[in-house]
Amino acid sequence: MKTLLKYSIGIGDRFGREGPAQLEALQFAERDGVTISPVWNKSFREHSIIGTTPADTRSAADAAVHDRGWKHPYFVDADHISLKTVDLFLSSSDFYTLDVADFISKPADARSIDAFVRLAGKFTGRLDIPGLRAPLNVSEDDVRKVATKYLLAVQEAGKVYRHIEATKGAGSFITEVSTDEATQSQTPAELFFILAAIAAEGIPVQTIAPKFTGKFLKGIDYVGSVDAFAREFEDDVCVIAHAVGIFQLPANLKLSVHSGSDKFSLYPSIHRIICEHGVGLHLKTAGTTWLEELIGLAMSGGRGIATAQAIYSDAYKRIDELCKPYESVIEIDRRRLPEPTTVNGWNKEEFVAALRHDQSNPKYNIHFRQLLHLSYKLAAEMGDDFLHLLERSSDFVGKNVTENLYQRHIKPLFLGS
Ligand SMILES: [Zn+2]
């Protein structure tokens, strides 16, 4: 049976070029004593925007693993798939993120809701979960509410899971269930009953991605109360440990944090909690690798920075189109975006200062960064010209990709430094 290591990280990049540089960061971690499984993740949304296929991701991953001599398990994630999009990923992926957020709040049929309420009835009243600050107090009505909100979504996850299993065979792939793109966050109590439903549906879930409190915007730091997040995250960890035992879910089931890139203010709390509880973690980060490519291009000067500036000018004009697929996960204040003429006058240091996620730099601009985060489509439109340029600047780009992943992500999160 395929199992995920205790620690895993969703990597990958828009154009399938940075695998070796990302693996190098994981090899630094290994040298420091922590082995982290890489999982190449690329969603249907990204593939359709760029015009790539899951087979491209698989070959990029295999090539990078070969190139760097990576000896540990690695995976290719069909990220955020549904019954509509899963078929495209069946031959290339061995990790499936079943995204059922669209089915949340759509009630299942009354018979299955009744059946679930009966099944979960034994957990009503006072529910002591080891590690939780206070016991949960759950009424039958609460269970019915959770069922009404989430049962159809879990049933849908079951359908997608069985569809994959029928083709690939049980145990030959990792299953994640994600509800992170829902409109409301899930409480630890809701998570408990969602896990009960997942177990009843027979899904061998190894990672679960709830929507946490606060905002997880693309490529920038967490927006919200770090303390509230840490409390909820720790409660979720306790709920999972308890649920694994009573619902016989896979023993390595762990939390998956989506849009995990650059949530720097959360990393110290997450590190402390996973160490104290001795549990694993999956962190999805991939999108900001593209920003490191842009930084590398800008640093290479000449045509590199000219191209980065041209992408920004184009993005500024096409902002509505670029924001549309990402509406729920970005917050760009258009008044704070620099004019393209200003950006075209910047030297490479100024461009990098505005883009690089360094909150101590007064020139850093989160609106500029978010808009460029969405702009990989424009680079894709440049076709081979862009890819050749990346290759020509690969020294600058690779160094930034490795350093970003190792220094800013892996170290604080998995090594606690
Ligand atoms: Zn997600």
Image: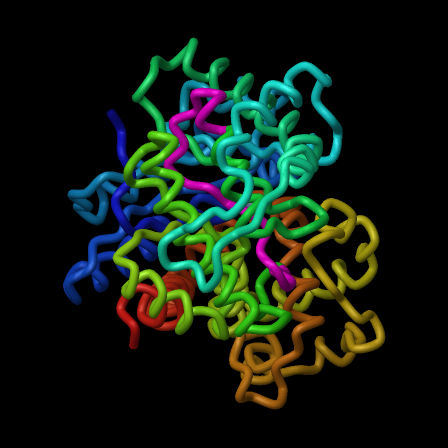
Q: Report the label total.
A: 0
Q: Quadrant of residue 305?
A: bottom right
**Is 207 part of what is drawn in magenta?**
yes
Q: Up-down: is 123 above or below 156?
A: below
Q: Which of 169 and 315 is in front in this view?
A: 169
State the image coordinates of residue 235 (x, y, percent, origin top left).
Answer: 46, 57
State the image coordinates of residue 92 (x, y, percent, origin top left).
Answer: 41, 25
State the image coordinates of residue 402 (x, y, percent, origin top left).
Answer: 34, 64
Identify the image's colour scheme: rainbow, by chain, secondary structure or one colour. Answer: rainbow
Residue at point 28% right, 47% down?
37
Q: Up-down: is 122 above or below 188?
A: above
Q: Up-down: is 306 above or below 145?
A: below
Instruction: Name the image quarter holding the C terminus.
Output: bottom left
State the image coordinates of residue 130 (x, y, percent, origin top left).
Answer: 36, 54
Q: Up-down: is 166 above or below 325?
A: above
Instruction: Name the image quarter holding the N terminus.
Output: top left
Tell me if residue 101 can be seen: no
Magenta residues (range): 198-217
* Majority SS type along the magenta span: loop
Residue at point 58% right, 34% down?
99
Tell me if residue 348 can be seen: yes
Q: Nearer the viewer, residue 367 or 6?
A: 6
Question: Is 83 placed left or right of 132 in the picture?
Answer: right
Question: Is 369 placed left or right of 257 in the picture?
Answer: right
**Is 30 part of what is drawn in magenta?**
no
Q: Which of 326 and 18 is in front in this view?
A: 326
Residue at point 38% right, 31% down?
247
Q: Nearer the viewer, residue 147 or 308?
A: 147
Pick out the residue farthest to the top.
166
Residue at point 26% right, 52% down?
36
